[in-house]
Amino acid sequence: MDFLNLSKFRRPGRYIGNEVNITKKRGLVRFALCFPDLYDIGMSNLGLKILYKIINDIPYASAERAFSPWIDLEEYLKREGIPLMTLETATPLNKFDAVGFTLQYELSYPTVLNMLSMANIPIKAGQRNHTHPIVIAGGPCTVNPAPVAGFFDAFAIGDAEDSIKEITEAIYLHKSEGDGKRESILKALSEIEGVYVPGYSSKPVKRRYILNLNDSPYPCAFPVPFTEVVHDRINIEIARGCSCSCRFCQAGMIYRPVRERDPETIMRLAAESVAATGYDEVSFTSLNSGDYSNLPYLLKLFNRKFKDKNISFSLPSLRVSSVTEDVIREIKVVKKSGFTIAPEAATSRLRLVINKDFGQEDFERTLYSIFKGGWLNLKMYFLTGLPTETDQDIEAIPGMAAEAMKIARKHTGRSVNISVAVSPFVPKAHTPFQWCGQIPMDEINRKNSYLKRALSRKGLKYKGHDERMALLEAVIARGDESVSPLIEAAWNSGARLDAWTEVFDFNNWANAAEKTGLDLNALAEKSIKPGQPTPWSIIDTQVTDDYLNKEYEKALSSEKTVDCKLTCNACGVKCKSGQFLSDVKPAEISDRTPDSFKTRYNPVKVRIVFSKTGNMKYLSHLELLTTILKSLRRAQVPLVYSKGFNPSPNVAFSPALGVGVSGEREFFDMEVTPPFNLNRFRDIIAQNMPLPIADMFFIPLNTQSLCKFITAYRYEIKNIGCSTEDIQSRINTEENRWILPILVRFDIINGNLEVLLKDTDKAMVKLSACVKALTGKELEDVDVSRKAMYGWQSDWVEPTQQVQG
């Protein structure tokens, strides 16, 4: 969006594009990969990155990305009649052959409609013709397509690594050899295994799944965001699927069987990803990372390779029984942040109901390992409103959290930060609890109110999920076609980006329910008799209803189902117990890393001069810092790190630039380990940094820091439309006279204002206030560039001329 002044919008780094590792190509088949949420969320999604790589690797195809804008930019685009476009080439979405949406969350559905509307694509499939893109949905929510079947042309069910290639080929053949009719391509798509096309697919559509993760495509060189995203790290899927059979968990049912990557494959992907992106953290993700067959071996292997490079790993929330001292020992090697466990239920009876069985001994052992390891922050996840739940089960939650605090004090000698996250149970399709309704809203409120009070009295933090959101999730998750008008009406009332509490407005949905005549509470609380047809019966996840029904009966009798790694429970998926697990046998690994044998030298300091111009001016100071640090890691600069639990590189920057302000001579200093070839690394850094380098040179280690040295700044403000006399008149007023002590001089050259400002003992230069005092305009409304910075050493001198001391 080069044509926009992004300074006027929140978090402009979301919109600038041109990230490191993006692909810009124009294939015969063009895909727009859309995520119905902000860039911050969408760029954390691994599935989108996988599809981006697969499609762009096809010679005749290309993939670009699009995300929902925040409210301020959305309103501007609509007001100006500018359609929603992709980041790569600023192409409107309606110019693509296919527009694909990832459906991760039920409340994102109105955002899908909003993005289609902003792209001038009819929101209803029946209103589209041969001039419109094929609109496709993928992701976990597609296992019940009924509520949104009228909005999508096709649904890719299950793993998309193979089906996306076949979908792309079908579109290619349709464009190159077909008759051009929309009906023809829809029919062709319906013949692909795992693709559901409403109106064309008459039989249940089988979920696709890949068998071998080791051979599946993985995006090591994915686009690296300039702005911070929710999961701002490398995410490597060490396993797909889960064998624990938690009865409330949809993902555990629809991603079967469990397939693991070998440790050596994971290590190769980690090394390639670190080299290509510059991230310093790798997250080992799966539905249940703690049960990965060779987890201690993998973690030790990782630390042996990456510890001395200050590259750390993280694990998502772990099952209580999967936290071992071996795992704890490896986690704390490089970086120690918070620890998360998911008990889900606080009584042994209810844990048997949901098939999440662990005992008090397991719980105490886990907490002992965590707190002995030095962690002082613990988050615990619980569900409320589970089938058969009683008040005793709810009352046990504060007791369990208080027990964790007691154990923490015993092993640390102090209090720790323990937070309890509570979410209402939402029944989902294709699970043993798909037959159950959600408990009434007043019951959810009563239980959550109790927990909030009880936890607060014990000095524990409570974090709850909005009950009204959970109500809507339940309505949609098991909804049928009658829910489609509700979603459309909610969107027409203003619903979008409803995962964000600052945007979510339940009134939009209440108004929609009134207009459509639907009772939200009745829909959410509705139970289904086992064996009855369901709206999602058109999708065959390959886990049978017979198995789900037996699991439901076992839940009601508090009967445990063993892990299917150990024995087959005949769920319907055609695999053998442990068939796709990693078969690498753990071996002894030396704790000494290869770098441990290197000779240690005293560090040297290097100063770099660079510019921050073009769209890069929209980065905040923090975003600029992280962008440069990733660049230095990609260039494999031997940075010196601080000591302690969370080491950071010894890199220091010149004073911050405001968002939207260009900088023509910016600086940073870095400490590096010699030998350091200046000319060689200048070339390598320049190749890896999306900011031009003007100079790079050694400085003494004890040189005064940039922020202490620099006290004056020369700015150019373009096309101000006023004279020297006008400015002189403004700064002599009572309102603006405060600027005189910090104003060294100013001049107007070719209609542009050049001004030198300095910090004083009493006041620091605040650019926005200075621009307002000098020109009467807001900073975001003018084009400002910082031309130079100076320190005082008998005269104003640049940091390139700074004398040691």
Image: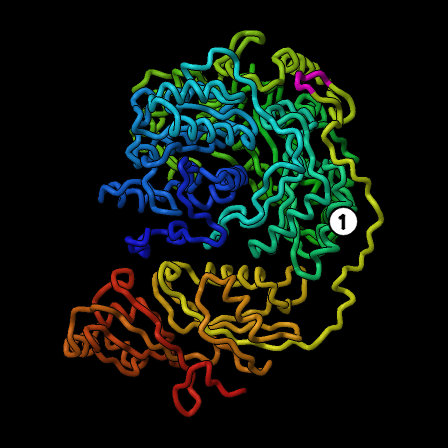
> Residue 747: percent from the left, percent from the top?
23, 80
Residue at the image point whose x is 75% and y is 50% from the top: 301
> Residue 269: percent from the left, percent from the top?
64, 47
> Residue 744: percent from the left, percent from the top?
30, 83
Query: SS class of the residue under badge 1?
Result: helix
Question: Is 750 situated above or below 466?
Answer: below
Q: Nearer the viewer, residue 17 or 114?
A: 17
Which image quadrant is residue 796 in?
A: bottom left
Determine if residue 524 is in view. Answer: no
Taking the view exactly as shown, the residue that stands out farthest to the right is 588
Q: Amino acid at mark 1?
A: Lys
Which is the main secondary structure of the residues drawn in magenta?
loop
Magenta stretch: give its range: 569-574
Which residue was labeled with disc 1? 410
Question: Is 157 situated above or below 760?
Answer: above
Q: Nearer the viewer, residue 242 or 676?
A: 676
